[in-house]
Amino acid sequence: MTENTSKSNKSLIIGGLIAATAVIGGLIIFTDVDLTQTAKLPEVSVEGGQMPKMDVDVADVNVGTKTIEVEVPTVDVNLPKEGPEADDLGDNIKVDVDVDADVRVEPDQ
């Protein structure tokens, strides 16, 4: 296709869209709709019925508590008993203890 043919095809498409829009707009503007009778819903009677029956098998879950003893490490801290070092340490003591514990609980059988 040449450039002129491509431009003329685009012009035809755009012109067609404009014409279709004008026709649809005219139909909407010049259409007159009047309500001549109101609607009435049908009367419905519902009686009886039955819920579906279900047979559901779920897992048996037992929840409880179990007391276990965990050995905790002891920490000994030797602070100076007297002097300026003891005064400074007593005011700014920060203890950070990380304990890694591997606890395994076996289910009761």
Image (cartoon, grey):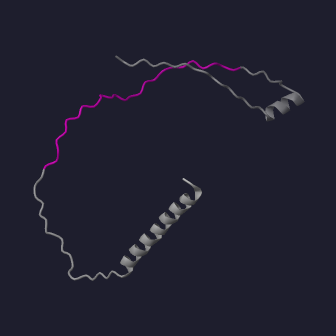
Query: Which of 60/1 is in front?
Result: 1
Residue 22's image quarter?
A: bottom left
Residue in the foreground of this view, choosing between 54 and 91:
54
User: Which residue is nearer to you in this view: 77 or 61?
Assistant: 61
Residue 94 vs residue 44: left or right? right
Image coords of residue 71 (percent x, y): 57, 18
Residue 53, image x, y percentages: 16, 41
Residue 67, horizontal then vertical, whole percent: 45, 23
Instruction: Give above or below for 33 relative to 101.
Output: below
Image quarter in which the C terminus is found: top left
Foreground of the two, 51 or 42: 42
Residue at 44%, 72% (x, y): give it: 19
- Magenta span has 6? no
Q: Main secondary structure of the magenta part?
A: loop
Q: Which residues are magenta?
A: 50-75
> Which quarter of the figure has residue 59?
top left
Q: How many marks?
A: 0
Q: Is residue 76 left or right of residue 79?
A: left
Left or right position of 99 against 24: right
Is 69 part of what is drawn in magenta? yes
Examine the rendered structure and indicate whether residue 40 appears above or below residue 91: below
Q: Quadrant of residue 54?
A: top left
Residue at the spot 59% in from the left edge and 57% down from the top edge: 3
Which residue is at 54% across, 59% downward? 5
Q: Which residue occupies 53% across, 63% down?
A: 8
